[in-house]
Image (tube, grey):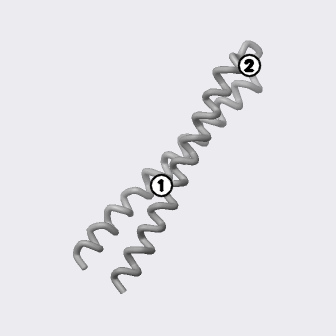
Amino acid sequence: MKGVMRHAASMTNVLPIAIAGLSASAARFAASANRVVQQHDVDLAAELVQQKLAAIEFKANVAVLKTADQMAKAALDISV
């Protein structure tokens, strides 16, 4: 039972990190989109790369949240 509790504590530490990553990647995407809209001499290729990277980061953080959720469910199933 102690092992399950230790892992549950570790998973709770992952959630704020993943949520902060989601927020950061959304902000990165929004900043790039704003530059494209507001600036006349913007490098569209560089901004597209920034937007793609932000999308990849966002998906990675969502995957972390899904995995943490699955692990929490598995830990609850084991402890019951």
> Residue 7, position in %: x, y?
30, 67
Determine whether, in the image, residue 56 is placed left or right of residue 69.
Answer: right
Please tell me in which quadrant of the rendered image residue 13 appears.
bottom left
Residue under circle 1?
64
**Identity of the amino acid at label 1?**
Val
- Measuring 66% from the left and 36% from the top, which residue is drawn there? 30
Q: Is residue 34 above or below residue 13?
A: above
**Identity of the amino acid at label 2?**
Gln
- The reply to whether the C-beta atoms of the residues labelled 2 and 1 are less than 8 Å apart is no
- Measuring 47% from the left and 52% from the top, which residue is drawn there? 18
The secondary element bearing badge 2 is classed as loop
Q: Please, which residue is most extreme toward the left here?
A: 2
Residue under circle 2?
39
> Residue 22, position in %: x, y?
54, 48
Distance Cα–Cα, label 2 vs label 1: 35 Å
> Residue 8, position in %: x, y?
34, 69
- For mark 1, does the 10 Å Cα neighbourhood hold few (<14), some (14 to 19), or many (20 or more) residues? some
**Sequence order check, earlier mark of 2 and 1:** 2
Q: Is residue 79 above or below residue 12?
A: below
Residue 37 or 56: which is nearer the viewer?
A: 56
The secondary element bearing badge 1 is classed as helix
Residue 56 or 21: which is nearer the viewer?
A: 56
Q: Please, which residue is most extreme toward the top here?
A: 41
State the quadrant of the C terminus. bottom left
- For mark 2, does the 10 Å Cα neighbourhood hold few (<14), some (14 to 19), or many (20 or more) residues? few
Determine whether, in the image, residue 5 is placed left or right of residue 19.
Answer: left
- Measuring 64% from the left and 21% from the top, which residue is drawn there? 46
Q: Nearer the viewer, mark 2 or mark 1?
A: 1
Determine whether, in the image, residue 57 is placed left or right of residue 8.
Answer: right
State the quadrant of the N terminus. bottom left
- Measuring 24% from the left and 72% from the top, which residue is drawn there? 3
